[in-house]
Image: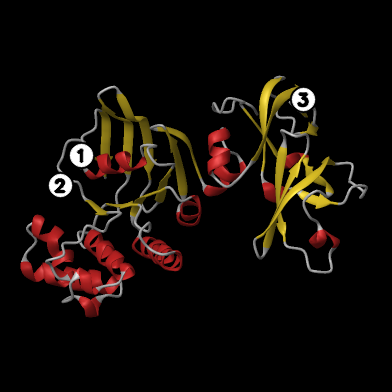
Amino acid sequence: MSELVLTSLRKTYGPTVAVDDVSLTVREGELVALLGPSGCGKTTTLRMVAGFIEPTAGQIVIGGRDVTHLPPHRRDTGMVFQSYALFPHMTVAQNVAFGLEMRNVPKAEAEKRVADALSLVRLGHLGERYPRQLSGGQQQRVALARALVVNPGVFLLDEPLSNLDAKLRLEVRVEIRELQRRLGLTTVFVTHDQEEALTLADRLVVMANGVVQQVGTPEELYESPANLFVAGFIGRSNVLAGRLVSPGRFESRGGLAVSVPADGRAAGPAALALRPERLTLAEPGAPVAPCMNSATGKLVLVTYLGATSEYRVDLRGDEVLTATLPTPPASDPLRRLAAGDPVTLTWPADACRLLAPDGAHDQGG
């Protein structure tokens, strides 16, 4: 295990800034996910750590050693690529042994380490097969074994599950997490899949336009997003534009008055983010607790999702809120709701998160 420290890491291509001033510490044995949309800089950051891309500026330290300008095979890293990058003319065992050959490991030791790595990923019986003779999940495990066999101080994974079908992706995700925990691997995992990141990572690093937007645990980013981008990218959020008119009181542009936590921020323009699962639904006229916010509107869409259902409610033409609720039983009156029906949404004040209206980092509370 090794600690990974990135300091003011930057990469430019001419006038284009791909990664801008990224500083991050990944502790020994920690799994950190770099998360963001395509083109956000997450893969460029990972490849700079691996040594495949030269930084324009900044420093990369692994296990206390500055590796910023060292070639990949001298960095104490193991990497799993999105495409697996297996050599088709080599057997499984030869593919796994490749990194050891690059490091001039003696043959006898290399054979033992290859056998141990394949056993670790439950492929000990397939060492003589070729990649074309394996399933997608098996090829993925070969790629994992090849990265692990060098005993890396830092384990790097670049969208390793994107080529697998949904069921297999879930299975391999669990296997990777169990393997990482069992071996205590310091790991950086790149993905654009928020569910993947939330279930795998100890901490998330959300990136956009080459800039780190927020770093924190899955719970911290979900419950307390730093800005509108994070609120929209981690999970789903209803967003209402408006202003804080007084401590604990927000008013949307459409005139909806909402009680919010009084967090000490000054009155002024703001955006309100509200998770769909924090909303409840009732028929108009149903009693509403005094401590709850409420808004009445017209149901425009009901989407049945099995265990849950989504309800889109038009409040004032340009303000629409989505509620995600457990699907009610067939006998429940809510089950019979249809587009065009009037409904009332309710939610507690502590479900509201006030953010800067332009998506800048929140300065409140």
In the picture, the disc for residue 135 is none
What residue type is disc 3 on? Pro
Q: Is residue 258 left or right of residue 307?
A: right
Q: Of residues 350 and 228, which is closer to you in this image?
A: 228
Q: Is residue 105 visible?
A: yes
| Residues at marks 3 and 1 touching, judged by CB atoms closer than 8 Å | no
Residue pictured at 24% horizontal, 69% vertical: 117
| Residues at marks 2 and 1 touching, judged by CB atoms closer than 8 Å | yes
Kindly state the secondary structure of the residue where label 3 is placed.
loop
Judge the density around disc 2: few (<14), some (14-19), many (≥20) Cα neighbours within 10 Å.
Answer: few
Kindly state the secondary structure of the residue where label 2 is placed.
helix
What residue type is disc 2 on? Arg
Considering the image in quadrants, where does the C terminus appear? top right
Where residue 294 sits: x, y (%)?
Answer: 83, 41
What residue type is disc 1 on? Val
Q: Is residue 226 visible?
A: no
In the picture, the disc for residue 67 is 1
Res 319 → quadrant: top right
Q: Which residue is mark 2?
A: 74
Could you give the CA–CA distance between mark 2 and mark 1, rounded to whole angstroms?
A: 8 Å
Q: Which residue is mark 3?
A: 247
Judge the density around disc 1: few (<14), some (14-19), many (≥20) Cα neighbours within 10 Å.
Answer: some
Could you give the CA–CA distance between mark 3 and mark 1, rounded to whole angstroms?
A: 50 Å
- Return the disc, 2 or 1, that comes first in the chain's sequence: 1
Q: Is residue 221 left or right of residue 351?
A: left
